[in-house]
Image: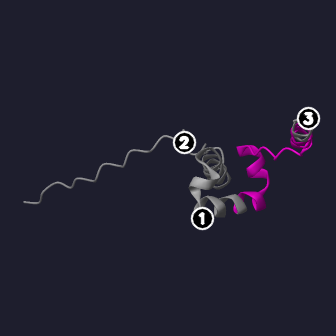
Amino acid sequence: MKSFLIAGVCALALAACSKPEPVDTVESLMLNPERLKDLRAHCKADHDKVGDALCNMVAEATRRRFMGEGKSPYANDPVPQPAAPAVSAPKG
């Protein structure tokens, strides 16, 4: 019983000392295109295994890299109204 307890404590100590897995954010994925590409492939191959949260972050990072902040320099420009067609007087 005592050896089982010691083995359990050692296993917990080793698990606590292991290096934590890197935490990905949308911003970190945007700055690391190789990691983004790798995760996109994993999400495409097995979405259930990777998980919704990470695949949603990958999709958002991809969207932001492609679209930017989504602000268009033309968004506030007024659309000019078309000129009225010239009306000619009927001949007759």
Q: Residue at x 35, y 49 (%)?
A: 83
Q: Magenta region, mostly helix, strand or loop? A: helix
Quarter-of-image position of residue 45 = bottom right
Q: CA distance from mark 3 to mark 2?
A: 72 Å
Q: Which residues are magenta?
A: 8-37
Indicate the quadrant where residue 76 lies: top right
At which x and y percent is residue 49?
62, 55
Query: How many numbered callouts?
Result: 3
**Residue named by callout 2:** 75
Name the residue type under label 1.
Answer: Ala
- Whether residue 51 appears in magenta in the rendering, the answer is no
- Element assignment for label 2: loop
Left-right relation of 28 to 90: right
Q: Residues within 10 Å of mark 1 (few under 14, many from 20)?
A: few
SS label for mark 1: helix
Identity of the residue furthest to the front in this view: 1
Disc nearest the viewer among 3 and 1: 3
Q: Amino acid at mark 2?
A: Ala
Q: Residue at x 59, y 60 (%)?
A: 46
Observer-nearest residue: 22 or 5? 5
Residue identifier under label 1: 45
Which kind of residue does numbered mark 3 sit on?
Lys
In this rendering, would 89 be left or right of 60? left
Q: CA distance from mark 3 to mark 1?
A: 46 Å
- Left or right for 34, reference 67: right
Left or right placement of residue 89 versus residue 76 in this view: left
The residue positioned 68% from the left and 53% from the top of the image is 65
